[in-house]
Image: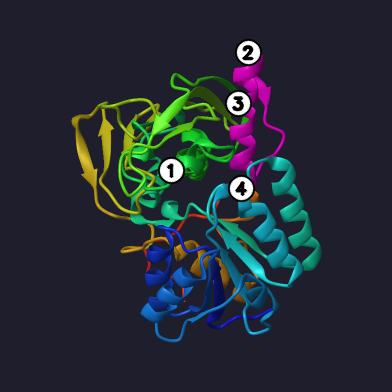
Amino acid sequence: MTIDAAKIGVVGLGVISKIYLETLQRLENTRVVAVSDLLPDRAMAVAAEHPGVRAASVEEIYSDPGIDLILNLTIPAAHASVARSAIAAGKHVYGEKPLAVDTVDAKEILSMADKAGLKVGCAPDTVLGTGVQTARATLDAGGIGVPFAATAFMTSSGPERWHPDPEFYYQPGGGPLLDMGPYYLTALITLLGPVRRVVGMASTPESTRTIGSGPRAGTIFPVGVATHVTGVLEHTNGALSTLVLSFGVWAGQLPRIEIYGAEGSISVPDPNTFEGTVSVFRPDDPQWIVVQPSGGYPGSNRGYGVADMVQAITDGTPHRASGDLAYHVLDIMESLLAAAETGTSVEVMSTCERPAAVPLSPPPV
């Protein structure tokens, strides 16, 4: 199937949808034509802000033969059902992370798409920006020799301080691992390749949380997931990555991601952003040196993964923010929690191809 400017229907219009809509409406090979939400008034308000976009029911978006791709921006618990419905309707689907709340549902999504000859994509696409891709280009050029280890840290006190409806972050499919883990794990796989084995531990220091902003400020709700997770990942190439993800840390001065090689180190910017400073340290020049952007899409934002997938559909090539990659990330996260529960190392049963590097280039068209 060839798509010039893919016509996109958006399902779910929460906070993140604003950025996607702005990005997709300015890229040449994507065009949002319809939006839907459980709250029809929200869909009508969003449509009114974007010329050429109409409000529709979810069923109308699925059944519209003019829509090529469904952008699934619902809460994690609904990711699988929306993806299955989109595929059953003959649509490609790109969704927010995680691909599903468990690998059983995720495997079904990929199986359905494969049988139907359709593409599945999944956030995060932050790794397509100049931050991670410049680090990737430096690493691939031998800038620090053979990499043997990495660290990845995401520590915060939790999203309830700023999000008006944060409960879903603390339900299955959420927590620091499944909410923020995909950014860090996708970056580590992009840099070092897939993971074959993990060890891990997890805890839930607080059984309840309190909403800190918005009309429901002061509301107390239960926590149903681990809120502090730490682990070690053994990559297929032998490198070891140490991971800490927490919604329980009030302040910290840890780096985001660092890669360590036989001939130096690379400091990688926040993988929840598209840009940022990449620095390299080598023993022959003992100071951190800033690396100028040498890979990725400059000025990118959420939605570039959709455009990259549309270009892949047109070209008949693999896309970078793929369902296979998202499935492997989800499998790693499930394996970490299983390792924490059993106190043993756990083999990661899936694998994926290391996504193709993005040369320093304009957006996909």
Give the percent coordinates (x, y) of residue 241. Answer: 48, 27
Q: Which residue occupies the extreme right position in the image?
A: 115
Relative vertical location of residue 64 with respect to residue 141 in this rendering, above or below? below
Q: Which residue is mark 3?
A: 337
Q: Earlier in the sequence, mark 2 or mark 3?
A: 3
Q: Is residue 38 visible?
A: yes
- The crowding category of the residue bearing disc 1, from other C-alpha atoms within 10 Å (few below 14, some 14 to 19, many at least 20), is some
* Contact between labelled residues 3 and 2, with CB atoms less than 8 Å apart: no
Q: Earlier in the sequence, mark 1 or mark 4?
A: 4
Q: Earlier in the sequence, mark 2 or mark 1?
A: 1
Q: Is residue 246 visible?
A: no
Identify the image quadrant of residue 197: top right
Relative vertical location of residue 38 with respect to residue 221 in this rendering, above or below? below
> Which disc is residue 166 wearing?
1
Q: Which residue is mark 4?
A: 77
Residue stretch in magenta: 325-353
- The crowding category of the residue bearing disc 3, from other C-alpha atoms within 10 Å (few below 14, some 14 to 19, many at least 20), is many
- The crowding category of the residue bearing disc 4, from other C-alpha atoms within 10 Å (few below 14, some 14 to 19, many at least 20), is some
Amino acid on which disc 3 is placed: Leu
For the residues marked 1 and 4, what is the alpha-carbon distance in whole angstroms?
14 Å
Residue located at (66% from left, 64% from top) = 119
